[in-house]
Image (cartoon, rainbow, N blue to C red):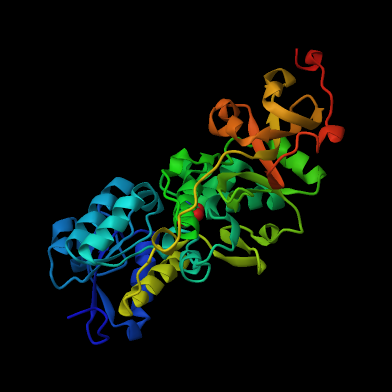
């Protein structure tokens, strides 16, 4: 019997019983109208104490994948390689699948799309981007035309939590990270959060649904908050800014897409400044409607489980991602031919590769740190790693993209720096 028949029970085989898995288990108990039950849970560590009946658990994945009465697999583990095997196997077994594994989805999206078509099964993953915010379905269903000018958002809850604590409570980076880990916001390997990898995985999924672009996530220019220096927070505050980790994609004048993840100065006039702690926020810009803002919890058990629950109900009416921008439109392409207004901070002026700037607009230096604001061509970042070296931090200015750059435009504002300054 099909799962679209409301009388058919959704028999769920759940992989993972961490913060989100347990959250889903509790939420399902309170959602009788969905007519769904978790039949079996596959876990890695049977020795851990769990808040659910012992007989629910197994360590044998095949018990779930080969059980014909299980019609939905929900994959909520944090090991992306294991998740790939579970999800691809489940799809090949003709089971509907719901997943929250952004790394796995971002790395294998092309194959996962092909499997959905080949085996005619739904694969939903709203929880993979911004947890409780239904941004994927909105990009798929509502912004299904070529008016979408851009998306920019805070898509990682842990780094936003850390930055909020640093800016508002003056807590140290290390302490704030520990709190984010204790609250269950951070990845098991928090380097994924703080180095910007989690955010770029999410950005690459958003690019597929927003613009039909399929790209290896790590090929996108990205950096995190781990390279920021205390002096950067002071510098930002002096200028009336906070710093947020922002993932963004914007349509350039040539119709192609600029996409990257980096820390960015944000002032009060941006809705992103209202996004605190583990919350996420996404600004969607369209040529006719101007800016729209989506806001909600971006990490944590219940917010993530709420998106999984919504995917489970969507299976009832046979909802599938159509990948409309890939199927019905000519997919957009990424492009590196634009400039960015950036601030670099360094230990000393001698570290500054000033020749890489097209314009230097401002610089300051004290005993701890030197800050340089300038205009740089994006290819300087895309084609080299010098800016990711220890001791260098990189922060974008608001509306940092300078498209169709006229070399003369900023000439009058630029600061002349003699070679001796850098000697
Ligand atoms: N570690 C992720 C975050 C979890 O902090 O956003 C939600 O994807």
Residue in front for this viewpoint, 413 or 187: 413
- Residue 290: image location, x then y, percent: 68, 66
Q: Quadrant of the C terminus?
A: top right
Furthest residue in direction right, as rendered = 412
Judge from the rendering whether residue 132 lies leftward or rightward of residue 12; answer left or right. right
Q: Is residue 185 visible?
A: no
Q: Quadrant of the N terminus?
A: bottom left
Question: Residue at the location (36% across, 73% down)?
Answer: 26
Residue in front for this viewpoint, 380 or 406: 406
Q: Examine the image and state in which quarter residue 123 appears.
A: bottom left
Q: How many marks?
A: 0
Question: Residue at the location (66% across, 47% down)?
Answer: 166
- Residue 176: image location, x then y, percent: 58, 47
Residue in front for this viewpoint, 23 or 197: 197
Judge from the rendering whether residue 125 lies leftward or rightward of residue 148; answer left or right. left
Q: Is residue 342 visible?
A: yes
- Residue 326: image location, x then y, percent: 41, 58
Residue 189 in the image: above or below residue 36: above
Residue 352 in the image: above or below residue 26: above
Question: Residue at the location (53% across, 43% down)?
Answer: 194
- Residue 132: image location, x then y, percent: 49, 67
Q: Examine the image and state in which quarter residue 389 appears.
A: top right
């Amino acid at each position: 019997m099909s799962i679209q028949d409301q009388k058919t029970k959704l028999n769920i085989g759940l992989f993972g019983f961490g913060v989100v898995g347990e959250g889903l288990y509790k939420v399902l108990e309170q959602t009788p109208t969905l007519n769904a039950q978790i039949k079996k849970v596959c876990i890695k560590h049977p020795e851990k104490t769990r808040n659910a009946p012992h007989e629910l658990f197994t360590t044998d994945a095949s018990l779930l994948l080969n059980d014909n009465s299980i019609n939905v697999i929900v994959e909520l583990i944090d090991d992306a390689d294991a998740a790939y095997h579970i999800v691809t196997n489940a799809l090949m077994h003709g089971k509907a699948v719901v997943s929250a594994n952004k790394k796995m989805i971002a790395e294998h999206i092309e194959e996962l799309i092909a499997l959905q078509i080949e085996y005619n099964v739904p694969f939903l993953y709203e929880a993979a981007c911004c947890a409780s915010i239904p941004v994927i379905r909105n990009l798929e269903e509502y912004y299904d035309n070529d008016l979408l000018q851009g998306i920019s958002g805070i898509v990682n809850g842990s780094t936003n939590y850390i930055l909020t604590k640093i800016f508002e409570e003056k807590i140290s980076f290390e302490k704030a990270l520990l709190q984010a880990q204790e609250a269950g916001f951070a990845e098991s390997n928090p380097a994924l959060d703080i180095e910007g990898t989690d955010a770029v995985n999410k950005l690459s999924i958003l690019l597929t649904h927003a613009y039909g672009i399929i790209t290896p996530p790590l090929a996108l220019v990205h950096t995190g908050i781990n390279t920021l220096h205390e002096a950067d927070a002071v510098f930002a505050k002096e200028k009336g800014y906070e710093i947020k980790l922002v993932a963004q994609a914007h349509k350039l004048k040539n119709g192609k897409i600029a996409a990257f993840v980096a820390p960015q100065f944000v002032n009060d006039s941006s809705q992103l400044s209202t996004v605190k702690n583990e919350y996420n926020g996404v600004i969607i810009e369209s040529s006719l409607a101007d800016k729209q803002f989506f806001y909600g919890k971006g990490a944590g058990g219940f917010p993530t489980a709420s998106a999984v629950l919504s995917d489970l109900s969507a299976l009832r009416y046979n909802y599938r991602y159509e990948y409309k921008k890939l199927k019905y439109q000519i997919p957009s392409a990424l492009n590196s031919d634009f400039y960015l207004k950036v601030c670099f901070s360094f230990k000393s002026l001698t570290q500054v590769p000033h020749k890489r700037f097209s314009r230097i607009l401002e610089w300051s230096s004290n005993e701890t740190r030197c800050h340089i604001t300038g205009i740089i061509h994006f290819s300087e970042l895309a084609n080299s790693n010098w800016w990711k070296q220890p001791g260098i931090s990189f922060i974008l200015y608001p509306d940092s993209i300078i498209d169709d750059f006229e070399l003369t435009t900023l000439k009058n504002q630029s600061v002349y720096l003699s070679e001796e300054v850098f000697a």
